[in-house]
Amino acid sequence: MSAAPLLDISDLHVTRRAGTYEFRLEVPAFVLPAGGCVALLGKSGSGKSTMLDLLAMALPPDGAARFAFAPHGVVIDLAAAWRGGAALQDGTRARHIGYVLQTGGLLPFLSVRRNIALPAEIAGRGAPDRVADLARRLGVAHHLDRMPHALSVGERQRVAIARALVHQPKLVLADEPTSALDPALAVEVLDLLLAETRAEGAALVVATHDHDAAARLRLPVVAFEITRAEQGAVAVARPGW
C-alpha cells in the first residue's frame, strides 16, 4: 500500500473581498507527495499568495471536497475540521510548516541566531546545534550574533531559509523569495532553497512569477488562470507544464 501524499486537495475554493471587489480562487486538484517540490507560477495578483495561505493552514477555505495533510503518513482531515468549526489547536502548523517570506521577514529586535531558533523554540524543539549547522551550510554562521539590519538582502534570505528549516518541518512554503534580489543572487538563493529542502527531506512549494527559474530548476508547475470581471476575478490553479 502506497504512502499517503503529504497534501491532497480537491474542489477547494475561497473568496476574498475588499469593499465591493471579490477575488475567488479555485483549486480543482492539488496533490503533493512527501518530499516533493512544485512551483506556483503566475503574475502578481493571480492567487499564489492566497494558495500559500491555504497550504499554511492560516486561511480556511470556504469549501473543499478534500483537504488532507499527512505529515507522518497519518492523515489529518482539515476539511472536516474546518467544516466543524474546529481550530488547529494541536500545533500542526508550528511543528510541520516552515515559511520563507519575500524579504525574509526577520524580527529586527532578535539576533540572527534567535531568529533562526524561533520556530524550533515555538515547536518545543530547542536545537542550538542545529541552528549552528544550518547557518554554516547556508553561509551565515559568521553573522549569528549580529542583528538583521547589519546583513545584506541576500544574507537575510539565507537566514530566512535556515529559520524555515530549523524545526525540521515536512512542508516549506516560499512566497516570491527572490523578488527583491538581483538576477544572479536570485539564482543562488533559489538553488540553496531547493538544495536544502531536499537535503532535509521536506516538500517545497515556491510561488514565483519567473517562468525561467521554474524551467531551470525543472520544477513541476501549478499555473494560475485568471478571468476578470468589473467587480472581481476568478483564478483557477491547474497543473501546468
Image (cartoon, rainbow, N blue to C red):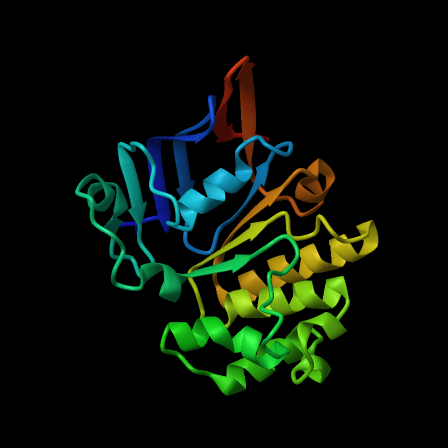
Pick the residue in front: 228 or 140: 228
Q: Going by the image, does 72 lie left or right of 241?
A: left
Could you say which quadrant of the image residue 17 lies in? top left
* Quarter of the view holding residue 80: top left
Residue 14 position (above or below residue 233) = below
Q: Residue lying farthest top? A: 230
The residue under the point 55% across, 62% down is 197
Residue 209 falls left or right of residue 233: right
- Work out whether 191 lies above or below 221: below
Name the residue nearer the viewer: 33 or 175.
175
**Residue 146 relative to residue 70: left or right:** right
Residue 76, x across and y down, in percent: 25, 52
Report the front residue among 161 and 18: 18
The residue under the point 63% across, 52% down is 102
Residue 32: name its quadrant: top left
x 39%, y 79%: residue: 125
Q: Is residue 223 visible?
A: yes
Can residue 32 be seen here? The reply is no
Residue that protrudes farthest toward the left in the picture? 84
**Where residue 155 sits in the image (x, y, percent)?**
72, 68
Q: Position of residue 52 (x, y in %)?
A: 48, 45
240 vs 119: above or below: above
Q: Which residue is drawn at 42% across and 46% down?
A: 55
Q: Where is residue 98 in the image (x, y as percent from the top left)?
A: 48, 61
For the C terminus, the quadrant is top right
